[in-house]
Amino acid sequence: MVQVLNRHVVLVGMTASGKTSVANEIARRLDIVSLDTDDMVQKLDGRSVREIFAQDGEVVFRQRESQVLNNALSEEKPTVIAVAAGAVTVEENRARLAEAAQCGRADIVWLRCDVSALVPRVQAEGHRPLLDNDAAGTLQHMASTRTPLYEAVATRSIDTDGHDVSKVAELIIDLVSTESET
């Protein structure tokens, strides 16, 4: 028996919660495509997220992000989609995610992670423009405002604390896949 997807798996959650790494691991295990909305924005725009923020501001970045999220959710074949942490702050994106879940085109999986685990990750990465000053305070504020948004769009959730990427991918695959004899 082989595990397969019959719909998109969309990963949402806080910055540095592991969405991209987990999406890549799920895709590798199931031999499907993995998309990352930040990467898609950079490819579309030809600039890094940091450059878009610096030159055009967050509003322009969020517009590009909405565009690529719509493109990703429109993919015909089931895909794993790592959604940028702030995408849920845009009502249009929440509506699009809810629509995809309601019509059975996607499982929206919230990767829950304690803020205290996120701080060392973002400090090591250094490419997140919203966290340049006071990463811990900013993350705490983001968590308090975004948690209800993640809860609202998620059809499922996984607590990632204490689990490595491999284990989180395994838990998600078990939640959302079906078995096939192919």
Image (cartoon, grey):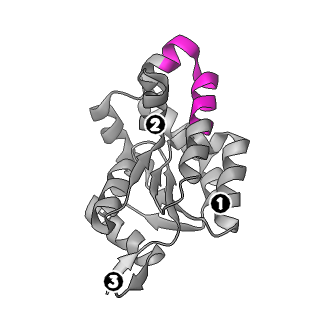
Secondary structure category for the residue under label 1: helix
Q: Which residue corresponds to the image point at 53% horizontal and 54% vertical from the top-left?
A: 75
Residue at mark 3: 182
The answer for how far apart the CA atoms under marks 2 and 1 are is 19 Å
- Residue 127: percent from left, percent from top: 36, 27
Q: In front: mark 1 or mark 3? A: 3
Amino acid carrying label 1: it is: Ala
| Vertical comparison of 179 with 126: above or below | below
- 76 or 6, which is in the foreground? 76
Disc marking residue 100? 1
Percent position of residue 78, x then y: 48, 63
Instruction: Find the residue positioned furthest to the top.
Output: 55
Residue 39: quadrant of the picture = top left
- In terms of sequence position, does the residue under pointer 2 or pointer 1 come before the other? 2
Which stretch did the figure color magenta?
52-66
Residue 105 appears at what percent x and percent y? 60, 65
Q: Nearer the viewer, residue 84 or 40?
A: 40
| Residue type (three-letter) at the residue carrying disc 2 | Met
Q: In the depicted view, which residue is nearer to us: 118 or 77? A: 77
Of labels 3 and 2, earlier in sequence is 2
Label 2 sits on residue? 40
Q: Quadrant of residue 86?
A: top right
Residue contact at pointers 3 and 2, CB within 8 angstroms: no
Quadrant that contains the N terminus: bottom left
User: What residue do we see at 72% from left, 51% from top?
Assistant: 95
**Which of the marked residues, 1 or 3, is nearer the chain's N terminus?**
1
Q: Main secondary structure of the magenta part?
A: helix
